[in-house]
């Protein structure tokens, strides 16, 4: 079976394992669709090119925003390209518009790779790859970042999936995040400190209807169970999509929007984003991983559907 579809504008990889099916784009190595038994677990998109609203994209070498695109390196201010003009920030790393190359693959898996080259604001060389491997109930995603340069390089990584459960209205799903602290976020989407979520609308540990929870939040102090952190969305019929992440993903970013580009026009959607560092990490230094020359970092997360049958 030919699992690759290519034109001059796009390249996608269709993966299948039993009743699990995924579509992966080479642009931003984005997961474009994931179904288990016919139930869609993410908001699908069919855009040829960079994913809309960063849907399913890999965010490297930083997730979220860098305030003004400026950050200090050895006492010298670095200036990244401003990619969010409305706020003046550099957003979602350097590979959001990049077409990855295909490496190994099978009917149920594919590995994509792309380099980060030295450029204004980020004078480092990285090799990055991501592997998608289907399972009977979802997908396992493995990331690898290697410092291919001569100097230590600051790295953080995130992913930007929008989750759903079939046709259930997103705002009627129950969201659970095992987080004890949240960031205060200013009107420019930059964090200004953290607070204990107990007694606030950011306490999602017991489950909160998406429509009644925060529309924009970054959460941390995540509880680990069974070696992973698990965020979930549950439908009224008990079907649940679980996003599990290794503890190195110590942050979860949430964003609820009413203008995701659906097939019938703008639609409600919720992004649930595992991140190894919070917004503005290049500038603050919080949770940055400084890779030594030739050092590699591997990270794993995944999605699964439970509560069926």
Image (cartoon, helix red, strand yellow):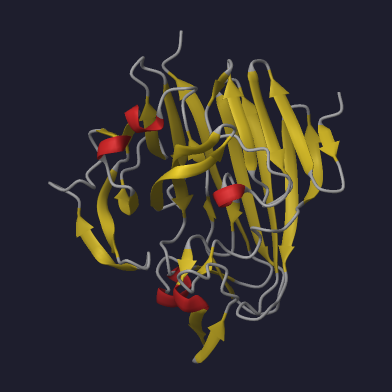
Q: Is residue 154 above or below residue 175?
A: below
Quadrant of res 15: top right
- Asked whether, in this view, residue 168 is left or right of residue 217, the answer is right
Can residue 165 be seen in the rendering of this structure? yes
Residue at figure coordinates x 60%, y 40% from the top left: 141
Residue at figure coordinates x 30%, y 41% from the top left: 178
Residue at figure coordinates x 45%, y 39% from the top left: 269
- Residue 42 place in picture, x, y as percent: 53, 33
Residue situated in front as seen by the camera: 192 or 17 = 192
- Residue 176 place in picture, x, y as percent: 31, 35
Can residue 298 be seen in the rendering of this structure? no
Q: Residue furthest bottom?
A: 75
Q: Residue furthest left?
A: 199
Q: Is residue 200 above or below residue 12?
A: below
- Residue 93 place in picture, x, y as percent: 58, 64
Total numbered badges shown on the rendered structure: 0
Quadrant where the N terminus lies? Answer: top right
Residue situated in front as seen by the camera: 4 or 111 = 4
Residue at figure coordinates x 72%, y 33% from the top left: 109
- Asked whether, in this view, residue 272 is left or right of residue 138, the answer is left
- Residue 282 place in picture, x, y as percent: 48, 73
Q: Residue furthest front?
A: 265
């Amino acid at each position: 079976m030919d699992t690759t579809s290519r034109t001059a504008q796009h390249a996608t990889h269709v993966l299948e394992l039993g009743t699990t099916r995924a579509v992966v784009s080479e642009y931003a190595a984005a997961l474009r669709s994931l179904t288990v038994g016919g139930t869609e677990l993410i908001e699908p998109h069919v855009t040829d090119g960079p994913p809309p609203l960063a849907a399913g994209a890999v965010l490297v070498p930083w997730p979220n925003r860098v305030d003004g695109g400026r950050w200090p390196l050895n006492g010298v201010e670095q200036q990244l390209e401003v990619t969010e003009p409305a706020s003046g920030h550099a957003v979602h790393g350097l590979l959001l518009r990049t077409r990855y190359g295909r490496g190994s693959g099978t009917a149920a898996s594919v590995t994509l790779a792309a380099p980060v080259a030295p450029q204004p604001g980020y004078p480092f060389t990285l090799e990055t790859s991501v592997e998608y491997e289907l399972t009977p109930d979802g997908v396992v995603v493995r990331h690898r970042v290697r410092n291919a340069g001569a100097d230590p390089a600051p790295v953080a990584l995130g992913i930007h999936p929008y989750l759903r459960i079939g046709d259930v209205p997103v705002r009627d799903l129950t969201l659970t995040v095992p987080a004890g602290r949240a960031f205060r976020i200013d009107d420019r989407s930059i964090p200004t400190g953290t607070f204990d979520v107990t007694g606030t609308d950011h306490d999602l540990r017991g489950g909160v209807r998406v429509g009644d929870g925060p529309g924009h939040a970054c959460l941390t102090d995540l509880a680990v169970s069974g070696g992973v952190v698990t965020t979930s969305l549950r439908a009224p019929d008990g079907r649940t999509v679980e996003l599990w992440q290794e503890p190195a993903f110590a942050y979860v970013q949430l964003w609820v929007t009413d203008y995701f580009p659906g097939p019938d026009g703008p639609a409600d959607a919720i992004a649930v984003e595992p991140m190894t560092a919070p917004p503005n990490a290049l500038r603050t230094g919080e949770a940055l991983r400084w890779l030594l020359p030739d050092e590699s970092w591997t990270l794993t997360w995944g999605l699964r559907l439970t509560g069926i049958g």
